[in-house]
Image (cartoon, rainbow, N blue to C red):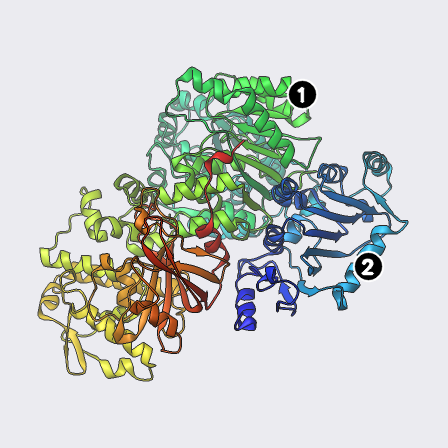
Amino acid sequence: MANVEEHVNATAENGLSRLDLVGASAGASVEFDSRPHFISNSKTTGDNLLSVLRRQFADLGENDTFDFCVAFVSEGGLTCLVQMLSELKARGIKGRLLTSTYLNFNSPDVYRKLLTYDNIETRVYQQNLHAKGYMFNRSGLNTVIVGSSNLTDRALTCNQEWNVLFRSYGADGAVGDLKREFELLWNCSETAPLTETWISHYREYISTATAPRPKGKAAFSDGSTIAVLGENEASSKKIKPNKMQEKALEALAALHERRDPRALLVSATGTGKTYLSAFDVKAAAPVRILFLAHRKRILTASMASYKKLLGDNYTYGLYRAGGDGTEFTCTFAMCSTICGYLDKIDAELFDYIVIDEAHRVGAKGYQRILEHFKPKFCLGMTATPNRTDGYDVFALFNHVIAYQITLQDALREDMLAPFHYFGIADLAIDEEEQSDFTLFSKLTSEARVNHIIDKIEEYSVKKDGRKGLVFCSRLEEARELAKRFTERGYKSDAIDGSDSDAERDEVIRKLESGELEYIFSVNILNEGVDIPSVNQIIMLRRTESSIVFVQQLGRGLRKADDKESTLVLDFIGNYQQNFLIPVALSGDKTYNKDRLRSIVKEGSTVIPGASTVSFDRVSEGRIYQAIDQGDFTAARFLKEEYANLKHVLGKIPRLADFDLNQSIDPLLFIKKYGSYHAFLKKADQKEYKVDFTATQEKILRSISMGLANGKRYEELLILNRLLHGVEGAKVNVDELVSNRSEGRRVILASAIRALTGEFNPKADPSLVVRNGKFLAFNFGMLEALRDEEFRRQVIEVVEFGLSRHASLYCERYKDTAFTLNAKYTYEEACRLLGWEKAPNYQNISGYIYYAPTNVFPVFINYDKAPDISDTIKYEDRFTSDRTLIAISKKKRYLSSPEIKRLMECPGNGMKVYLFIRKNTEDKGGKEFYFLGEMTPTGHFSPTVTKANESVVEIGYELDIPVRRDIYEYITSVFVEGDEA
């Protein structure tokens, strides 16, 4: 293959994708990259050792093997790999793992789990071993990773680790030395084969060892404070705020300084909201405090936390019905109790009021309480302020957000236990078309119970001490599954809203004590319940709300002793709203489809900290399908997302506000309505009273639709200079083209044609006029800009486009206007390629040659719609992440003009660019990934379609390999029939 070194270099830069060799099937004589490659757990490059190991596993063929030598294997580290190890087991790929008893680190559960893989032989070196090496033996090619990473979740994902990957054919040099050393350790007298008997002896030994293996916080924490470790946890240590709590306290101090009466603290479950409020109470030193919640369990736990932190500064107690509130200086009250006796309590009695679970303030009881009391300060605390019931929580707190700690922030700062999420295909059950009885029968069938239990066993490393919460779709399902689990030996119970607080507390107590393994429920455990020891979350219901998903996930993320991480199993059916799963896991609410797809494929590099995300093949396909078919420009959806941000801000958001608040991508409003102004006129008629003339509407629509995405900045640059100049301002073209390459001059000329309306006169209004070397607004634009609100909105769109360009499109590919891996429509591609006039896009049909600039863009729909005509149902296909077979238009021969041009390329100077999309079913997704330049390989093969039409197969080699997540998404095959 030509340019092997460039190929490997580029591939290495592409996240070690397909690093092992170029053309492995060619045998040992094929050139490969033998240079070492550095691997670190880098969020900057979006790669970590776990991702590299998964890719190496995925590339193993039928007769390939792997050998690992690692001193430590943690429960979390093994959990990270269980899905891949199960796939290797199913494929019959064999491996060996050598670990050790060093420091008694490895748990008996880890050894027990390893013994379940009959394709992996495990041996234990019973002396001090500190090596960390991973070897993959593939058709004679040895790929080795050595360095500092043990097989622990943190070492694989987020610790500062240094590892090196290198490869070699045969057993020469360092690779040979490593393999020989492995064999020596594997076969030495100090090494024992892993057996049930050995595990039994080891379990007995560590139970009596003088230096038992580390566990709990000591095993995984790097110094998190007690304020995070658990609000119920007693300690003699001095309690100090953690780093994020310190920032929140600074923000609260500033609010007190300016005498704000109310504020909202938005903080993820398990991040120490109660302690944070107590820290602020300590700093503010109020005379009397009232702490409100809706459950007694919350109040008693919170009171214990306040006592620990505030000590003898206050007296503490629960409010008693009928009292006047003066019994204690720090009173803890249930809303339902105190609201019945407000007439007995002085409105100004309490200086500081704390409302836990503040998203409940829309209830009448809370409304009455807040209307009655007049404190100096009221702090609302919640993890989920955006409510599905439509109540504006933010308005009640004057749209003042004291501080916000998201789930992602908390994971990044190690405030929560890491989780290992696995998306698993559920049995095919159509919940829309089943009768209640039939649906219940299927949800609780023997087959589904077997499927759930089998998967729990497959993915669980921990055998004893499981404490799981199981979330179901229906109450009857929860009760029946709890019964069936208990019958199968998994002690379980179900709770619901009809249970009293005492009954619920008793069930929770049994889980905490180990008398139960699982609690089944629907929504009753979503909030207000803290069970730090929970180490499994099982989701048996469809995801219909990212808010509820995060609530349920958060139930298992509190840190606790003897808890290394939390296992999350999500049983995924074929549901339209499956796209909410990557939204919830990542916290990315832009609803950008490419970001969501990237999270599905590379979630473990996106989620902060040691947490990981993995999907089996069927569930992955189901989510891809939901993303493709999701209509994120539906009017109702857009109005809801707009209203959410408006509630937060207390005003109509501007375009930039959506990005600043990490909200929905505002380009979706423009995509649906033509401009943000047009959306506001439809969606917010009550407050938005702006009207423009028809000409102004057309101009605003053209700028919004064509330029707000920021894909080319030249038009935006010209408009920005004209808008910020004095009336009659001009732009000197000579200044714009100075020191530009020929390619950049073509781009600028194209941008000018777009602004003058020459590129597409039927669709785009003329905005500027060219007079010699100067550009200026034409008369119509100048007249429109006399309206100050119109001018403000045009400037807003232009500045938004410049911001988008700076963040997403500033790194251009070679001498083009494109950004590698970005997406472009037919119109955008032709405009940015420098077409003088917009072509008839229906005539492109796969590719089009443009003679003035000698370019040949190729547009490929990789998946063909099932009902497409046989005359054009060809097989365009990747043969690797750098090579492609494409099919010509029909009725083409080796003598056809475009085929002859390709055969003469690159000698004729023609540039061939690849634009590709997976399918045409992506709603609103008429965009193609730009994958750069490609060159014909010389493979030109005449053939015929099923309809007996003549075509030519054309082989291409890409300049840069396709980015891993895009390649796997494009080439993935969704097979719904693979579920259990």
Q: What amino acid type should be assigned to the residue bearing mark 2?
A: Glu
Residue sitting at x 65%, y 51%: 154
| For residue 481, side relative to residue 110 (left or right) | left
Label 1 crowd bin: few (<14), some (14–19), many (20+), radius 10 Å: few
The residue carrying pointer 2 sits among few (fewer than 14), some (14 to 19) or many (20 or more) residues within 10 Å by Cα, namely few
Q: Is 157 above or below relative to 444?
A: below
| Relative to 425, 517 lies left or right | right
Residue beneath label 2, please? 181
Q: Residue at x 71, y 39 (%)?
A: 117
The quadrant in which residue 228 appears is top right
Dot 1 amino acid type:
Gly
| Quadrant of the image containing the N terminus | bottom right
Q: Which residue is mark 1?
A: 489
Q: Judge whether residue 581 can be spotted in this image.
A: no
Residue 406 locus on image (x, y percent): 48, 46
**Residue 461 position within the rendered picture, expressed as x and y whole percent measured from the top left:** 68, 37
Secondary structure under badge 1? loop
Distance of label 2 from label 1 (alpha carbons): 45 Å
